[in-house]
Amino acid sequence: MEEVVIVGSGIAAISAIKAIREYDQECRIELFGEESSYPYNRIKLSKGLMDDIKEDKILIERKEWYDENDVELYLDTKITAIKPDNKEIVLDNGELISYNKLVLANGARNATPPISGIDKEGVFTLRGLADSREIKDYAEDSNKVLIIGGGVLGLEMAWALSQAGKEVMVAEICSYLMPEQLDEKACQILEERVREHNIEPLVATAIKEIIGQDKVKGVVTAEGKEVECDMVIYSTGIKPNLDILEGTEIETDFGVVVNNRMQTNYPDIYAVGDVSELDNKGFGLWPIAIEQGKIAGYNIVGEDASYQHIIPTVMLNAFGLSLFSIGDNDKRDGIDTICEEQENKYIKVMIKDRAVIGAIVIGDMSKSATLRKAISQGIELADLDFTDVSVSELIEIIKSK
């Protein structure tokens, strides 16, 4: 009987299992997760940061689903090493588990910024359910919280803490918030709305040191300015979990290097989700993890499946604002832009070689689906004068395609 071992218990792992079970109900599937919780939806942690999050409310699948799909689930179990030549993984108790096919879905951890005092009491990062509970408990007795990192996760945490009555600041090393997804105008709109909700954005600000005898009393910026706070949460990118690959010849760079079948340089070992690297890129996005898990699962059961790049999409619903960013939004030569701005609304569409390659939408989500369609399908906009067309007209043209 084929033995499939999956290391990691996130959405990529569950997606791989679903794909396998579409075609093979007989193979043995063993799923190993380090956390004591059943696989759950991590993206809900920041949105409900100050809520009393119940594990059963955020599960990816019901607990019964694992028995129904004949999945042997091992929780609170750490994998310490892989022996590719023997087709075995090593558990922390020394036990060896053999496999025919191995899926690495062990994700990533939050990157720790090089800041003096980052290990003080009162400094947190949000990656798992236990982290969210620790943050909530500590925040109950905190008044002034500094978030390091002005991306989506940092802003969602800032919003949740502000709604709980905390004084919140967001430090971002770049010159504006969400620098990877937005342009300058969109950032201005976002920052204005952030300030309206009593959150102070500290853009172009690097934190050099966290001060306090034993626990947080404040921070010092790279310019030497001291900022008072009694709690710090950092969200400054991710680092794939590669420790278990030490001593192997599995190819890694930033993450585990895979081809478009999600295979590593060992054909019987796959890597998916946050731990993987494809075409010199890591992604760390939920929809991409789902698709990569599916592709690995299909190939494990003999289906010939290839991963097709999903256009990166980011959404933010906070500060009374709905925001959507998709695709490539870098301004450079050879790019046409169409913009539309009204009160509390902003839409910018990026076009190259007569096709939409990116878009930013604030306040009018009704156009998001059409713009996503244009990008994903590569719809050609022939014979269109981009200097004399509105966003609304462009949307109608795309819909007619």
Image (cartoon, rainbow, N blue to C red):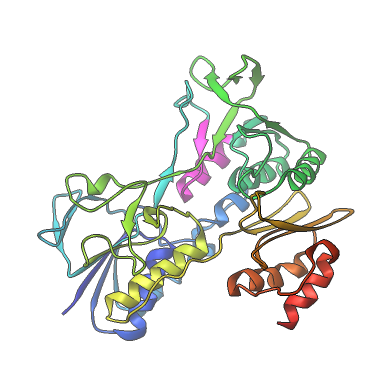
Q: Position of residue 206 (x, y in %)?
A: 59, 26
What predominant SS class does the magenta segment belong to? Answer: helix
Residue at 41%, 70% in the rendered image:
307
Quarter in which the C terminus is drawn: bottom right
Q: Is residue 135 magenta?
A: yes
Q: Quadrant of residue 384?
A: bottom right
Residue 48 visible from this viewpoint: no
Q: Position of residue 98 (x, y in %)?
A: 14, 64
Residue placed most toward the observer, 84 or 80: 84
**In the displayed structure image, the side of residue 341 where residue 60 appears, left or right:** left
Q: Is residue 158 magenta?
A: no
Q: Position of residue 217 (x, y in %)?
A: 59, 19
**In the displayed structure image, the side of residue 327 where residue 131 appears, left or right:** left
The magenta-colored residue range is: 123-138
Is the residue 150 above or below the residue 55 in the image?
above
Residue at 69%, 38% in the rendered image:
176
Residue placed most toward the observer, 3 or 303: 303
